[in-house]
Amino acid sequence: MTQQTSPSEVARIFHAELSEDEPVPPRFNCAPTDPLTVVLELEDGRVVERHRWGLIPHWAADPSRGSRMINARAETVARSPAFRVALRRRRCIVPSDGFYEWERRGSTRQPWLIRRADREPMAMAGLWSLWRDPGSYLWISTCAVITTVANTIVAPLHERMPVLLPKDAWDAWVDPGGSSAELLRELMVPAGDDVLERHPVSQRVNDVRNEGPGLIEPEALSPSLALG
């Protein structure tokens, strides 16, 4: 996942307030357990915060469970012990400028960047949670991204994709108490095929230690790797 858009710009786009003014550098290769910029609704208004990627359920004994909870499946999220409470009460938006999927052919893992065709940030449907460390008693804010079946842009690379919320659904999604289960189900569907575009990028993306804008630049494929 990439998050190049600054938290202050995210706050402007999503009509929210910054929870802190500390500068955040653009990210081009976010990985599980990294902090992500998220948008959520609290009692005193909509805010932009930083949450660790990988939701730790409030009942978890230790934080290791969170590293396996980066995604929640739309088809099962409402009945999952790890995610069902967050779906009812703690939904968030994870703004992203793009996400990566891989074409697997033999031993080659060719990364592709998927982003909005209009280059605007995507509003990924997310969940958030608070977990208290039993040793330090410190609270940790965490999040996960909801996924659904892939549309025709993503399907050649992967069978799943993030749920992308249209602008007119933002308010309903982050509202902690005013959205019905039926409405939430209606929102957790694949994005239209005209919303996204994709292009191959450097295999440097395969190492989460690599960063920088060069990771998202288009890269030519050999004919044997070109997708139809």
Image (cartoon, rainbow, N blue to C red):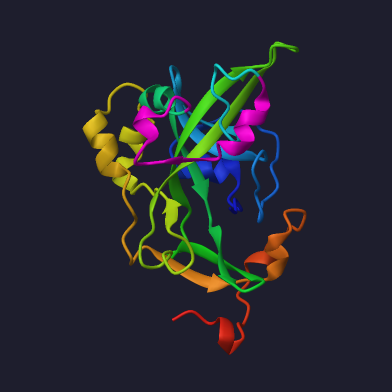
Q: Is residue 60 visible?
A: yes
Q: Nearer the viewer, residue 12 or 140?
A: 140
* Relative vertical location of residue 103 with respect to residue 40 in this rendering, above or below: below
Magenta span of residues: 62-82
> Is 162 displayed left or right of 54 in the figure?
left
Q: Can residue 196 be found in the magenta stretch? A: no
Of residues 192 and 123, which is closer to you in this image? 192
Residue furthest to the right: 209
Quarter of the image where the C terminus is located: bottom left
Q: Is residue 73 one of those drawn in magenta?
A: yes
Q: Is residue 52 visible?
A: no
Q: Is residue 99 left or right of residue 167?
A: right
Residue shown at the point (74%, 58%) measured from the top left:
207
Q: Is residue 47 above or below residue 26?
A: above
- Image coordinates of residue 161 in percent, x first then y, are 44, 54
51, 46: nearer the viewer: 51
Q: Residue 212 occupies which quadrant of the picture?
A: bottom right
Return the residue found at the far front.
Answer: 106
Check the image and name the residue furthest to the left: 182
Q: Residue at x 29, y 43 (%)?
A: 187
Q: Could you tell whether 118 is left or right of 59 in the image?
A: left
Percent across and percent down for residue 192 are: 31, 60
Q: Position of residue 9 (x, y in %)?
A: 54, 45
Q: Toward which corner of the image does residue 159 lie, by quadrant?
A: bottom left
| Image quarter of residue 45 | top left
- 210 lies above or below 181: below
Task: Judge by depth and name the residue closer to the eye, 36 or 134.
Answer: 134
Question: Relative to 172, does residue 107 appear above or below in the rendering?
Answer: below
